[in-house]
Image (cartoon, rainbow, N blue to C red):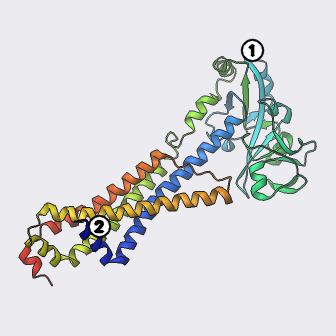
Amino acid sequence: MVQLLWSNLRARPMRTLLGIVAIGIQVFMVLFFVGLTAGIVSEWAKRVEGVGADILVQPPNASIFLVFSPAVMQESVADRIAKLSNVDEVAPVLAVMNSSTMDVVYGIDYQRFNALSKGFLFLQGKAFESPDEVIVDDIKAHTKGISVGDKVTLLGREFTVCGIVAHGKGARFFIPLQVAQEISGAVGRVSLFYVRSTGNTELARQEIVKLLPSDRVRSVGEYMTLMNSDNLPQFKPFIRAMLGIGVVISFLVVLLSMHTMVLERTKEIGILKSLGASRLDIIRLFIGETLLLTGFGIVLGLASTFALVAVLRETSPTLTVLITQDWILRTIALAIIGAVAGAVFPAFRAAGFDPVDALSYE
């Protein structure tokens, strides 16, 4: 039986190759794009956690992606929060997206933002001292070949790089808060507050809720739980669509391929049945060919995905692709399900041929 499977696949090399490539594309498409989504979400969450705050304070209905939160909160609210008994430090932040490069820019009060944790770890240079200076994280500096003293254009304005810091503090670029407010037309307003408690995060959070009952107040722990591609409702339709497209691709490719094979091999099927092959033997033959084809397609898809991830890790370190074992197994299962579903009808049709009619088929 194994020899027959190999012979059938080798007899039609072009069709076999196209089938393998199609299933490989399905595996690659699902695994890579889901991994890219999960990677972006995970990397963003880690950067927020790296700021060093315990609590996030945002306006009502603010996006979980902080850069999309509107700048409607009064900066002066930071002083009111700082007076609470369980609050140690508050840092107002204006988060802005640099539309030309899609990089996150934080407008910060340097002293207060730096005080949230052990502070920025400077690899080169120093903190900004004038309105036209910017701090850049090391990943962005390495990717773009930026050094201290270089000029960069952010938000339509030219800045001089004064320092390069270790990544993981929320954004890729940091500019003075007042400058960000001026550029954004949001003088005196911010997107959110990062808050560090004195030790009891929940008590501090409850105090802030009482002070600002209409605002969204989350602990960073809660935020990290929410920042999961499986938990975000915005991403579920996208993921379901990718999975559906993947299953449809493998189903249609295998259905077309196997249906054509049945027509081409009608006499062969008749010979097998005249030699004593049962209906089950014929079904097993076609399902076996499908599984063998799918196996090669899965290997090709996985190899292509990991090869591209390795390339992106070197060429675009700011782009994170998170491939988990769970999604590898899901993708393999989907490829097998779609392929086997596509082979069922042709297999049962072949098994139902009458040996006499099959042998006389032209």
What is the C-alpha distance between the residues marked 1 and 2?
68 Å
Residue at 34% x, 65% y is 293
Position of residue 355 measured from the top left corner of the image (x, y, whole percent): 8, 74
**Mark 2 nearby-residue class (10 Å; few <14, some 14–19, many ≥20):** many
Position of residue 249 measured from the top left corner of the image (x, y, whole percent): 38, 63
User: In the visual, does 226 lie left or right of 281?
Assistant: right
The residue lying toward the viewer, choosing from 81 and 360, is: 360
Q: Residue furthest bottom?
A: 362
Residue at 63% x, 38% y is 62
**Which residue has dot 2 on it?**
255
Q: Amino acid at mark 1?
A: Ser
| Badge 2 element | helix
Residue 354 in view of the camera? no
Q: Quadrant of residue 76?
A: top right
Say above or below: 285 vs 174: below
**Which residue has dot 1 on it?**
85
Position of residue 140 measured from the top left corner of the image (x, y, whole percent): 75, 52
Q: Amino acid at mark 2?
A: Leu
Task: Report how many numbered discs are placed on residues in the image.
Answer: 2
Which quadrant holds the C terminus? bottom left
